[in-house]
Image (cartoon, helix red, strand yellow):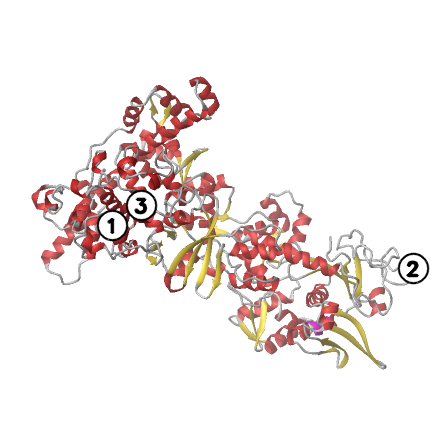
Amino acid sequence: MTGTAFGDLPPEAYHDAPWTRLLPWLAPYTPATARELADLTPSPDWWITESPAVTTMTAEHETLCRHLANVFIVRHSTAAFGPSFPTVPRRLPLSTLANSTRVATAFQRLQVETVADLEPLTVKDLYDVRGTGHNTVEDAITALVSAAIVRSGELDEWEEPGDRRQPLGGAMQAQLPPAQLQLLEDLTQLAAWRHLRRRGDESLLKVVIEDGAPEEIQELALRLNSLTAADMAAVNGKSDPVLEFTAFLAELDERQVRILRERFLGRPPKKLADLASEFDVSRERVRQIETKVKDLLTARFHFGTAIGNLLASLRTEIQPIAALDRLVTLHPDLARDVPGVNVPLWLVLDRLDDYFEVTDGWAAAPDVAAAREQTRILLEEFATEHGLVDLATITAATSMPRSELLAWLNWCGYLLHNDQILTRTRSLNDHAASLLAATGEPLHIDDLWLQMGRDNSVRSLATQLADDERFVRTDRATWGLASWQLEEYTSIRQQIGLELAAAEGEVELTQLVDSITSRFDVSPSSVRAYAGNGDFEIVQGVVRRRESAAAPRKSPGDTRRLFKYEDDWWKFRVTVTRDHLRGSGFPVPSGVASLVGCVQGEFVELESDLGPQSIRWTGLQPSSGTIKRFLDRLEVREGQDIFLEFRPYGRFDISLQDPVNPEDHPLEQAVALTGCAEGILDLEDAQMALAVAADLPLYAEPRDILSAYRQRGDDDIVRLLEQAWTRHDQRMDQSPADPSDLEDGRDVRDSDGHSSDGVTEAEPADQHDQALSDEGSVAVPTGYRSVGWVRPHEAEAAVLAYQLHSDVPVHDGDKIAGWARYVDDGSSEASKFRASVMLARARSQGERIVCWIREHEAFSIIQAAAEERSVSVLDHDGVATGLVQYFQPGSDAAERYRSTTRLLRGRNGRTG
């Protein structure tokens, strides 16, 4: 057994007792429940029907023991060693089992000397030893398995382990404690690695000495800090990877070489059927030869060989992407042709190692698609609220040269403007916002359209910007970003923003109203309405911005795919790749690092049933240690989604995501994607679970939930939420016309004279200048139905009624001209009319109902009056559900109905 206390032995040296007697924990397994065991030997149930004496005749000793050790580590981490390995002699010194200095160091720190001392301990106890990782635990358990299956009589003089150990270098080293021997081995291996990475001049150690230490100690620290790889002789002489691979080819037979050349290295690979025909054998036989060649390659070119070392160096360079030209410059051997297969060495390594692949001149780990996704994640970490990433910042955060980084970003489809990377250009609005933010000043609409270079027309661009609160007009045809707080063209909202900026973010509502109404011809109610909506909120009489700009680094609640399950319990959804299954670490968002308290330059270890799990931020971005042992326990396959669970009290675990049932309600599907579906009984529970998962209040409104997931970038969940709540709106608007669809007491008909219950194609919203009909009424645009001529001051009262949850008088000068009557959301009236405010006008004979009006409709009326134009009515999800028509003061319609605004609703629940 290579590298362990026992070597390969003849059959008579092994126990002939059944496996389940030697290793009782194998008894529950069957070939169906332990596929990893069934594939080790030709006999699929060898651990049930055979003994070690029989099994080792067809299985290699070390491979067999290591596979069994990994099964025990993953599935029996809490089982005590004593009953698990009953045939290992209890007086056997552990120095005999210490197959490496790191295992000996672990035993020393546990203060155990014989197998008897190990009896009550478990795998978890080994993981808890300071400085002990998975490889050390695997070596220790492998040695126990090996000792359990070998007859104890074959261990010559095991009572005197000193005679069994080979000194690592002279009598003095043989007498050193294990920890010191391990230090020498580690330094030697580190020096060899630095030589391979061409960093032989870098210091191997960093020793810090206290101020005032003796001069001798200070000189000692100086010597240690100046020690480099160049000061230490390489373990092995420099070898040639091409010659090494050629020598390997010479050991293969003709069929193996052809399969290697035409299947592994072929461009494209030859089909199994074609090779089977040429060899005159079955396809299965060709597959068996192919598997054998794969096994030989894996076993032959491990770390320590020229090719294995070169592969290790390449893996370090490809993080996660590197230009092939740069790798060839760093390692010229990559460009050499390999005799016998007639392809360059880089292609051999590409096909040999699953860690990376070469595509279109890029070496990517594990492939280009994964590298592109990691690049997207890294850019998200530094992106501003408009999706900009400073090129200098991202260059410093990667190991790629600037020119190579630019080429890669261009290959991925990212745009660059003023040394700013534009990461959000998929939609027209996002592209415009990013370009304006990168320019840093307002642009004429024609210039903006030219720089964007899209197929949309200038008019379409202007329409989109007008309906998006991220943009403001700074002149008739010039646009900027609202976040710049520039003077907006005829906008109360911008005036409030400037007032807040001048007052350092907060201002008394009364002071704000007095300041704006003294300079502009607007009503106090209009100012109050704007101050309590959109970007602003009123808290105890003070106006402030509703939320601050997003930080480049994300908090847990703002992190994509990271969901809050309950207090101090979060779940991060990950799609499993070959990299995870192979045992590699992987990057995680900074929100995960923030969640576990890991700051840049440090690492955190979380507790788990399978030993410590590390989260590190010692490199360019946070990363997680290997999760392979968890995936093995759950038998996870590539492509499945899992949740990294960060539980209370620093506990860590992994769970599989339950399959999403496409027949379920979209809200239930969305909850399933968060991993927080437990205990969900109805759609109300689902909505609350979605709010909690995004770190929102339990009873958050749907629009706030949707906005949070959209801002986080959880597009899959956003689509489901939009589908769920869009359907809800459709169901509502498909109901019969509500009693509020009256126009001054008369039945309203469209321009064709039909009842507004019909559904026809809607006309463009800007076609609002309708002529008077023959009957003297204003025609209703096709596709709409009239709610009523609602006056702007009535809409202002309605908005205040919604904010105050109480009745608000409608003032017309010094007189009370009516009331905005508020009813509770749960009342029968609110349910019937789908609104909580009724507008009524005062008459000498009593009040007369104008209509039942919704909050977003009232706000749209105020906006139309303030901007003197017709505007679309958008619901809380941004869906157009109606139109507010604006008529100039003095026009026939405005004079006839004593209002400049008329509220229309889409007859099919939405417009367009």
Position in image of residue 744 (x %, y %): 84, 69
Check disc 3 and give the amino acid type: Thr
Q: Secondary structure at mark 1?
A: loop
Task: Using the numbered discs, state the Cα–Cα distance from disc 3 to disc 1 in whole angstroms.
Answer: 11 Å
Q: Secondary structure at mark 3?
A: helix
The earlier-in-sequence mark between 3 and 1 is 3
Residue 247, quarter of the rendered image: top left
The earlier-in-sequence mark between 2 and 1 is 1
Q: Is residue 555 at least partly visible in the picture?
A: no
Q: Which mark is residue 774?
A: 2
Check disc 2 and give the amino acid type: Asp
- Residue labelled with disc 3: 20
Residue 277 lies, with reference to residue 104, above or below; the image says above
- Residue found farthest to the right: 774
Position in image of residue 369 (x %, y %): 47, 41
Q: Which mark is residue 337?
A: none
Q: Is residue 862 left or right of residue 212?
A: right
Check disc 1 and give the amino acid type: Pro
Q: Secondary structure at mark 2?
A: loop
- Residue labelled with disc 1: 86
